[in-house]
Image (cartoon, helix red, strand yellow):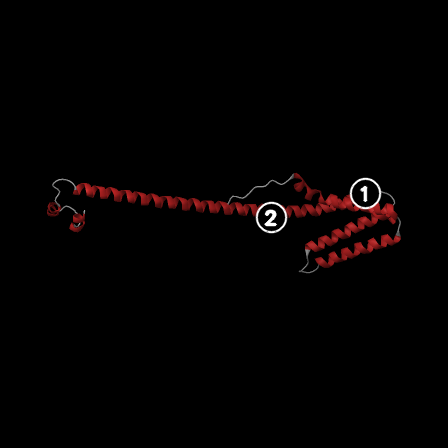
């Protein structure tokens, strides 16, 4: 029942929130390096990136079609298609304004999709924590009831043992009294232990 509580490091908590911006910024940075190394106004490189982006988008469409569609695979393919398109434009363009505009748009879309995933994950986490808390409360209630029941049984047994000890002491004391005669008690009609038991004492 006692679980170890560990606090997450602030960097581990902040990294998922910064991941979309880091991804799009990395793509923009690498594309601008590619632009400086000969990709600017290169038709062959532009055709290659366009073909790759369209291929990734097609893979995303295929992954999301039908009942057996895989949402994670489709999302990954569409993200790759967007990243390739951003890299192609940022590598081909001669200025920085269009790549920055596309970077801002891609970052906004990435955060929009990530926020939806974070909300779903948060709901699942809260539901799980609520379920675990309810189970703990139920188990704690059962443990308390069983503890009270066991305590009552122990107390009942203790009272019974004390009564038996007192009764035995009273019988021994009565049998040791001077002039005690069980036959006189029987003749008087008073309740008495069987004669065999009295003789054994």
Which is nearer the N-term, disc 1 or disc 2? Answer: 1
Q: What's the residue at 35%, 46% (across, down)?
A: 153
Instruction: Check disc 2 and report the residue beneath it.
Output: 124
Q: Nearer the viewer, residue 123 or 140?
A: 140
Q: Nearer the viewer, residue 33 or 53?
A: 33
**Label 2 crowd bin: few (<14), some (14–19), many (20+), radius 10 Å:** few
Q: What's the residue at 46%, 45% (across, down)?
A: 140
Q: Nearer the viewer, residue 110 or 161?
A: 161
Q: Is residue 139 left or right of residue 110?
A: left
Q: Secondary structure at mark 2?
A: helix
Q: Position of residue 89 (x, y in %)?
A: 83, 48
Residue 139 visible in image: yes
Q: Position of residue 184 (x, y in %)?
A: 10, 45
Residue 105 visible in image: no
Instruction: Check disc 1 and report the residue beneath it.
Output: 100
Q: Position of residue 142 (x, y in %)?
A: 44, 47
**Label 1 crowd bin: few (<14), some (14–19), many (20+), radius 10 Å:** some
Q: Position of residue 186 (x, y in %)?
A: 12, 47
Q: What's the residue at 85%, 54% (across, down)?
A: 47
Q: Is residue 38 left or right of residue 3?
A: right
The answer to which quarter of the image holds residue 54 is: bottom right
């Amino acid at each position: 029942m006692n679980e170890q509580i560990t606090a997450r490091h602030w960097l581990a908590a902040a990294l998922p929130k910064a991941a979309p911006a880091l991804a799009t910024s990395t793509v923009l940075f690498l594309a601008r390096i590619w632009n400086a190394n000969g990709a600017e106004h290169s038709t062959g490189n532009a055709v290659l990136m366009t073909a790759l982006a369209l291929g990734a988008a097609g893979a995303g469409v295929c992954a999301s079609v039908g009942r057996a569609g895989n949402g994670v695979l489709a999302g990954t393919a569409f993200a790759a298609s967007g990243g390739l398109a951003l890299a192609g434009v940022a590598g081909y363009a001669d200025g920085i304004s269009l790549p920055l505009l596309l970077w801002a748009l891609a970052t906004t879309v990435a955060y929009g999709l990530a926020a939806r995933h974070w909300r779903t994950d948060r709901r699942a986490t809260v539901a799980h924590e609520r379920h675990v808390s309810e189970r703990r409360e139920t188990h704690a209630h059962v443990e308390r009831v069983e503890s009270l029941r066991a305590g009552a049984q122990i107390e009942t047994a203790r009272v019974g043992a004390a009564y038996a000890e007192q009764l035995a002491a009273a019988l021994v004391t009565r049998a040791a009294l001077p002039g005690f005669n069980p036959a006189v008690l029987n003749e008087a009609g008073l309740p008495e232990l069987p004669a065999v038991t009295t003789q054994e004492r």
